[in-house]
Amino acid sequence: MENILTTIDVDKQYGDTKVLDHIGINVPRGSIYGLLGPNGAGKTSLIRIINQITAPDSGEVLFMGRRLQRDDIAQIGYLPEERGLYRKMKVGEQVLYLARLKGLSNADAHQQVNTWFEKFGIQSWWNRKVEELSKGMQQKVQFIVTVLHCPSLLILDEPFSGFDPINADMLKNEILQLREQGTTIVLSTHNMASVEELCDYISLINRSRCILQGEVTRIRHEYKSGEYELCFEGDGAALMEALEAGGCRITGHKQEKQNVSVTVHATPGSGNDLLAKAISSVKVVSFSEMLPSMNDIFIRKVNEQH
Amino acid sequence: MNKISIIIRREYLTRIRKRSFIVMTLLGPVLFAAMLVLPMWFATMETEDVKQIAVIDSSQLFINKIPETAKFKFTYAADVKLEDFKKNLAQTEYFGILYIPPYIAYTPRGVEFYSYRQAPANLTMHIANAIEKEIETDKLKAHHIENLDDILKSVKTHIDIRTFKISESGAEKESHSFLNMGVAYASALLIYMFIFLFGSQVMRGVIEEKTSRIVEVIISSVKPFQLLMGKVIGVALTGLTQFLAWIALTLVLVALAQNIFLPDLTREALQQANNVQVIGSLAGDSVQYSATTEKAREMLQMIQSINFGVLIGSFLFFFVGGYLLYGSLFAAIGSAVDTDADTQQFMLPITIPLIIAIMVMINAMQNPDGPLAFWFSIIPLTSPVVMMARIPFGVPYGELALSMVLLILAFMGAIWLSAKIYRTGILIYGKKMTYRELWKWLMYR
């Protein structure tokens, strides 16, 4: 698949502090790409370099296969982690101004603002000052500002932080819808549930280094640790005995009506053996291998480094 | 370039539509006009208040000797005890009591003045002068000089010095220190005020963008330098608009106020102006040649002696140039801090040259070609204020050009430095700033 954005060996240093150390990422066109990492790992620094707010000390950034240029900002939409608008300025005027700074002509800007305001049903806000809006309303305006110029690459830094559940859900749907339309989205986040839900690819950055990257499903398969979920009817004690004799460990269980399901820890790849033992002692209703959550992988990888 | 103009437009429009801008634009000229008209008006009011002063003269030397003026009248009380009079002062119409001791010539500090309200300085000076003069005359009389009065009259002299400047080509030009000083003072002070007023507006604008967190959205669309330039120029246009509006409104208000409060004065002035023209045609006619018309003619001459082309041209140049230099420094400060309150420590290095400039300006008005005035009118940080104080007296074009070129270079240097601090500063929050930190920012790529 073609990559819309590639960074090659990007280094950045502030004084004596190295914030990015040979970062290389490949963002396939049309995907949702997650940038993960603890606070201060260097995610925002990387995003600022992609937005040409700062320049890398060395390394290269490619956009659509060629070196990133100043004019490319018109094709990039950016929602910074620290969000804000001019508080005293009227909503309509402000959105128009920011659209024009992105390079839209006056007429195009007007048309786009009207389309988006209609879509969100906020035409009546045009003449209100930003400070008169609630926080949720301001977030809607902020999102419109980000996508107004139909960017082919959308960069969202912690998009869900500070959004209330309703707006967060709206945002999620918008992100998915934009991907449908062919927009590539890079999002940096701490919210691991949203990573599993949204991201196709991720890079995990810790202490300025990229420590894990690739397709989300592949990573989760790779980090399988031999957890299985077994749902059965019958004598639980017999099952336990049979499994523990085979070196497995039951790590949790829950009752669901007449069925009981247990979580079993075994050596990775020994699913068939485990199932054979179970079948011999109880009636198996369902059996599946559990994929690790991104949250577990995140914590594991980050702790490995410490 | 197009993006800078979009930024300039926003900075300009949002500022001139602000209520505070409109109020200041309307109120400014009222204040200016008040400053010009009120003193005149007070002067006309003052005459109504006549002060009666009772004089107890124990020396018997000054009875009917202190000259009366329009405002001060003296009554000489005989056979009254000071203590009794003091007790009854409230019941009388007198403003105060002047007590002169018996042996005044030997006890010059013995003269006393009692009143319920503070005695005005011009009253005590008037009395002191009168008494001094009387005693001096008495002492002279003690030498028994013949025709003393005539001699005294004949030695009385008043000198007015006319000053001429010789230009390099050898031509002589009469210069008028008093008017030049007024023009110098006013234009230098205006530039100083403009730099502070609008420089700090730039700073506050930067802080606003930083604290509202909108700055990162903007600099993902434009270069920080474009945003910085757009803001500095937008505020400059705001300032120029306000300044021009002030001048226009002030002129209108002064004209109006003079017609309402001082109709006589304007008529008189008009008459004087007419007289000047009449004198031109009736050169030999001595009847019209009064003191007031002479003054009016001098005034016209003085005004004509100023080179207005150079004055206005350089005023606009230093007005804008000085602002741009300081404005870009103010912007750098704004980018380095989180709130207005944090600006103090960084304001100092900017305020000091401006205050030095004002101090040198006072000196430059008295000695416009001295070394102090010369150097500080060349050094860019002080030149806008100090050079304006020199220009009404005439400055060689070479010096003027040098000063202007240096100011432009300094502005380019300042905006370059500021841009470096600015682009880092606007993205940093909640960090205690130090000069060391700023230095590090300058070194970043």
Image: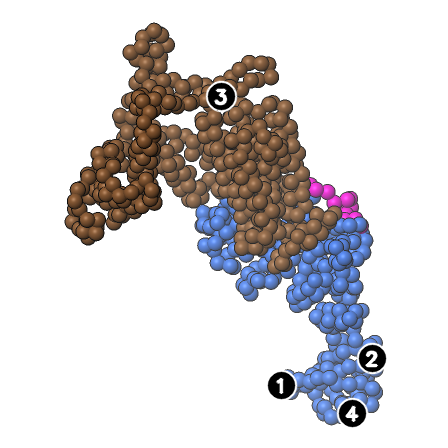
Q: A220 or B280, which lies in front?
A: B280
* Residue bearing the label numbered 2: A267
**Disc 2 marks which amino acid?**
Thr
Q: Is residue A92 visible?
A: yes
Residue at position x 20%, y 44% in the image: B94
Real-space Cα distance between discs 1 and 4? 23 Å
Real-space Cα distance between discs 1 and 2? 30 Å
Q: A1 or B381, which lies in front?
A: B381
**Callout in the foreground (2, 4):** 2
Q: Quadrant of residue A204?
A: bottom right
Q: Are marks 3 and 4 in contact (CB under 8 Å)?
A: no
**Callout in the foreground (3, 4):** 3
Is residue A7 in the magenta section? no
Check residue A241 in the rendering and tell me which mark sits there, or answer none: 4
**Callout in the foreground (1, 3):** 3
Describe the element under mark 2 as helix, strand or loop: loop
Residue at position x 70%, y 42% in the image: A70
Q: Are marks 1 and 4 in contact (CB under 8 Å)?
A: no
Q: Earlier in the sequence, mark 1 or mark 4?
A: 4
Q: B112 or B303, which lies in front?
A: B112
Q: Is residue B269 visible?
A: no
